[in-house]
Amino acid sequence: MVYIFNRLLYGFLVVWGVITAVFFIFHVLPGDPIAFAPRADPEQIEGIKKELGLNEPIFVQYIYYLNDLSVVSVYKTEKANTLNYAYLSHFQIGEYDLALKKPYLKRSWSTSKPVGEILWEALPETLWLTFAAMTFATFLGIGLGLISAMRPNTFLDNLMLVLSVIGISVPSFVAAILVSVFFGYILQDWTGLNMGGTLWEDHATRGRQLEMKNIILPAFTLGIRPLAIIAQLTRNSMLEVLSQDYIRTAKAKGLSQAYVILKHALRNALNPVITAVSGWLASLITGAFFIEHIFRWKGLGWATIEAVHNNDLPVVMGTTILMASAFVIINILVDIIYSLVDPRVRLE
């Protein structure tokens, strides 16, 4: 419990640091953040300034921003009645209101929708893409690494090494362009796949339909680099474990090779793989940005790049904070899972 508390405290400090950096980068270094807003009439600009509290000193604005992001916030009663979001729970203490609410990330400058709503609509698309890519990379990578470790220094092993180096070296946006053009355009008659699309497509005659085929190419592209790394880690870890004394003892007892591999060797060899998978799981969420844009996959990456094009500062800030929070949560969960897989690790 102490370990989990320390990890949660550390994660909270990391997220707070990111929020602070994001706020001051966008509010201090460029000058007036309204300069980044799309063209608007004076009334709209005044409304934006009022919501952001730009007439207040910068540190007062910072406190207001933290107060809006917090799930427990304190406001003066007269101001609480004018806020742009609903409370989950609401208590009045003297002239102040204590509010239990969802984090408030302001409103989009280009659409006037709450940023939280925009991110919530885009998040499932990115999660589906990340889950598909990581599942593909994990199972195929472990399988290839296991096969390679069972036949070291053979043609198959050397071929996998070469392909792994290529997979790690090619930038994701380059791979996305090549995969999109080759499988979605040149070989489209054979593959039946499109160069881009979303998970749900609106058709003129058939209405809104689930298009699972649209996730194949972006998930494959996004999974290439983690696949190469997982395969290499599995191979190297398996070769190290297979040389241990307890493996030789298990074989000397007459246990079958399949039982020794699956029951004894593979479990211990998966520790570095789990660490790699955890790191890539968080990285893929952010690494999907350019891939989503190339394949027209309307997730967080698509929404963020569109926000950059439209100078929509609140959406960019909200995405950055969401990504930082995802990194922290995933890393904490992986530390706990790692201790369960490896009995030598204990949470203290």
Image: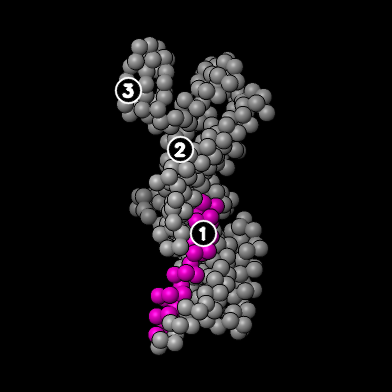
Distance from disc 3 to disc 2, alpha carbons, whole Å, reads 25 Å
**Residue 250 seen from this side:** yes
Residue 124, given in percent of the width and then of the height, sits at 42, 48
Residue 238, given in percent of the width and then of the height, sits at 52, 74
Instruction: Characterize the local packing of mark 2: few (<14), some (14-19) or many (20 or more) Cα atoms within 10 angstroms.
Output: some
Point 57% across, 31% down: residue:
20
Can you tell which of label 3 and label 2 is closer to the viewer?
A: 3
- Marks 2/1 in contact by CB < 8 Å: the verdict is no
Secondary structure under tag 3 reads: strand
What's the residue type where badge 3 is placed?
A: His
Distance from disc 3 to disc 1, alpha carbons, whole Å, reads 42 Å
Distance from disc 2 to disc 1, alpha carbons, whole Å, reads 31 Å
Q: Is residue 89 left or right of residue 65?
A: left
Residue bounds of the magenta highlight: 255-283
Q: Is residue 173 left or right of residue 123?
A: right
Is residue 182 on the magenta stretch? no
What's the residue type where badge 2 is placed?
A: Ile
* Residue situated in front as seen by the camera: 150 or 171: 150
Mark closest to the chain's N terminus, 3 or 1: 3
* Residue situated in front as seen by the camera: 62 or 298: 62
What's the residue type where badge 1 is placed?
A: Thr
* Residue situated in front as seen by the camera: 321 or 270: 270
Q: Read off the residue under disc 2.
A: 118
Q: Read off the residue under disc 1.
A: 275
* Residue situated in front as seen by the camera: 48 or 79: 79
Point 63% across, 79% down: residue:
158
Q: Read off the residue under disc 3.
A: 90
Can you tell which of label 3 and label 1 is closer to the viewer?
A: 1
